[in-house]
Amino acid sequence: MAVSGTVLAALAWSVLKPSASVVKIANGKPAIIETSELAGFERLPAGRKNLIETAIAVARNSPWLPYSYGGADPALGGFDCSGAMYYVMTQSGLTPPRTSAGQYLWLRDHKRLHIIPQDVTTTDDPSLAWLQPGDLLFWAAAPSTQDVQSSNINHVAMYLGREKKDGLPIMINSTDGRSYRGAVANGYGVYDFRVPPKGSKSKLVGYGSPPGIPEITNPNPGELSP
């Protein structure tokens, strides 16, 4: 039985057409910096230096690690937010939980967690005075009360400190849609550290040093400025 050209063309299209399940990455590759670009890095304790060096090395040594839900190993091609922090911390000899909620509770249970009031909208708020490079940062779906539940935690990142060139605070994490100096990106890399504005659906709710990293007991907020 002869097959018409129209039928053959339709069959070819059904084979070659793009699959609806193909994931297209709309945003570009995130920024990467070196520790030499961080203000005051050389004055940090050894444990914090190692943690930050590891975090940056993971980004530097990978061509691109897009945001990937459930990802916790660069060998598999990408990270989600907590998977990135889990991998970096385990590579640094720490034993964190896998999820962002678990990491939040990990800090809380070790009395490492600093709670941020809901009305905070700037990084120079007094509630952030104890924030140090290497600390974890937590965001949550905006809670109706100050009592944040671990189930509300929806993002985690690592604070890197301030850049020498402009004094602005930065962080490293895996995300899709955050930006660095105005450039929106996707994946594991360096981003601006900002507090969500008033009315945002997500709030910065806490931060603290990962257990296993000595806390800086008498921080001087101005000491790490350029």
Image (cartoon, rainbow, N blue to C red):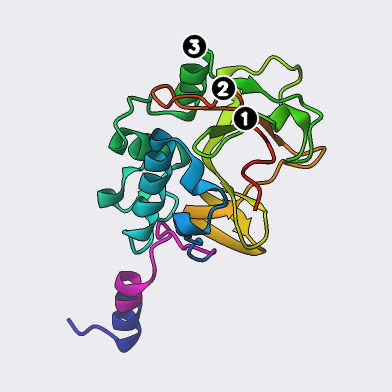
Numbered circles on residues, count:
3
Toward the bottom, the furthest residue is: 5
The answer to whether the residue labelled 1 contacts the one labelled 2, judged by CB atoms less than 8 Å apart, is: yes
- Cα separation, mark 1 vs mark 2, equals 6 Å
Task: Indicate the secondary structure of the residue bearing disc 1.
Answer: loop
Q: Which residue is mark 1?
A: 219
- Cα separation, mark 3 vs mark 2, equals 18 Å
Image: 50 above or below 3 = above
Q: Position of residue 6 (x, y in %)?
A: 35, 84
Majority secondary structure in the magenta region: loop
The answer to whether the residue labelled 3 contacts the one labelled 2, judged by CB atoms less than 8 Å apart, is: no
Image: 77 above or below 70 = below
Range drawn in magenta: 12-27
The residue located at (17%, 81%) in the rendering is: 1
The kind of residue tagged 2 is Thr
Q: Earlier in the sequence, mark 3 or mark 2?
A: 3
Residue 109, numbered label? 3
